[in-house]
Image (spheres, rainbow, N blue to C red):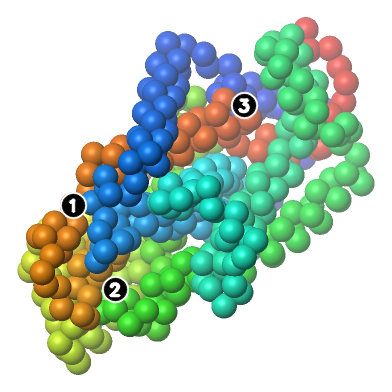
Amino acid sequence: MTIKKSPEESRDRLDKIFHDLTRSLRVKDELSRFWLFILIMFCIVGVWAWGYQIQQGLGITGMRDYVSWAMYISNFVFFVAVSLIGLLISSIMHLLKIRWAQPVSRVAEQVAIAAVALAGIIIVMDMGRPDRFLNVFLHGRFASPIIWDVTVITTYLTISALLFYLPLIPDLALMKNRLKGKVPGWQYKIYDILSLGWKGNPQQFKLVYHSLRILMLLIIPVGLAIHTVTSWLFASTLRAGWDTTIFGPYFVAGAFVAGTAAVILVMYVYRVRYRLKEYFNDEVFDRMGKTLVFVCLVYLYFNVNEFLVPGYKMKVAEGIHLTELFFGRHALAFWFTMIAGLILPIVLGVIKYFRRPLPITLIALITLIASWFKRYIIVVPTMEHPHLPVQNVPEHFVHYSPTNPEITITLFAFFASFLIVTVLAKLFPVITIWEYAEHQGIDKKYMFEDYDQN
């Protein structure tokens, strides 16, 4: 139960919370500049590689007639997966009034926005003729799952941006009142415009609460649809390894694993970099660790189902596919994803010691890397084994290997997502100030009163 504080205690506590949670806006040291420089340079190199690919054609990649989906689509599925964490934390946990998740919600939305934005960009980069992208909207057929995918991705990005922005409006008003003369003029102008004249009266808060609730309810079917539709792009074919009815929930469960791991990583960076140990405390990491264990258990069940059933029936095509995964050229990546991406977080995550901030962050890092390789082995091995016989073609048509331009463009996606999260953290608080203060017993009427900060 939250205990209301006296006016003096409320103002003092609010000052501390505001100072702590806006530290990310004020940190402008050499490390910050170097980090931004690295991100921007990698993004520039990635855009250059994409321009080179447009000029030379997709022939400079390792993709051929047989393996026409490769590292780019693996990247797309991975970023779509990571983006789903916004649904779990910002919507479901908020609707269930799970209090410990409150400091994590804005981090989850930052990750979701960056991931879903890059998912859309990657699809364009995978096109041989990106100038024809608008034809998807102008001449697309409703019967095509690609149209469904584009629609849900666009809708999910819009709702995620609104879920990020609406709780931010009161914080923008606080920063407008308290940071005048302390931040660059252009930055203050952003706060002034985006705060929409917020005064902090009960009617405005009621409108924000009502709007957020609607968005939280809307994002649940949209979020589930974005990964379900992506899975249908695979499952609607007859290829061995994809021809299954469980791909929808299978993809959703895997998405929660990747997204939870990504949020844990970002939380730890914020905790250390911006000295937010009091806010991203040990309890939050412990609960996120338990969440990671739970979603890994669910995903492990679907993985067992994915391989046990076709392995029991052992049709010819499925047998070739499973043998290639278990013992063939993709076996190392496959067993890494199974052991490091599922078994390791489950076994270690049930031990309380490993749910402390640093150990669970290292586990999350390994899990996230394994999650990317999992998408790779979903896409590539299946395409290397079509039903039609592979004959009279060069060896490099049969087996896929990524080229340098592909790797560069793939790395661009990661660094661009880091850049989006970094920019959001440098412009806006990484935890909702007014909501956290309210949970600490500070009445909202003390947050927006005008008084001299000197």
Comparing labels 2 and 1, the label whose residue is closer to the camera: 1
Q: Nearer the viewer, residue 16 or 448?
A: 448
Q: Residues within 10 Å of mark 1 (few under 14, many from 20)?
A: some
Q: Position of residue 115 (x, y in %)?
A: 49, 47
Tag 2–tag 1 contact (CB < 8 Å) = no
Type of residue at label 2? Asn
For label 1, the residue is 401
Q: Residues within 10 Å of mark 3 (few under 14, many from 20)?
A: some
Q: Nearer the viewer, residue 43 or 226?
A: 43
Residue drawn 59% across the image and 43% down it: 106
Check residue 303 in the rendering and tell me which mark sits there, or answer none.
2
Check residue 427 in the rendering and tell me which mark sits there, or answer none.
3
Label 2: which secondary element: helix
Q: Position of residue 156 (x, y in %)?
A: 61, 57
- Which of the two discs, 2 and 3, labels the residue nearer the N terminus? 2
365 shown above or below 317: above
Label 1: which secondary element: loop
* Residue 447 left/right relative to 437: right
Type of residue at label 1? Ser
Tag 2–tag 3 contact (CB < 8 Å) = no
Q: Quadrant of the C terminus?
A: top right
- Which of the two discs, 1 and 3, labels the residue nearer the N terminus? 1
Residue drawn 79% across the image and 54% down it: 211
Q: Is residue 445 visible?
A: no
Q: Position of residue 208 (x, y in %)?
A: 81, 48
Residue drawn 39% across the image and 23% down it: 41
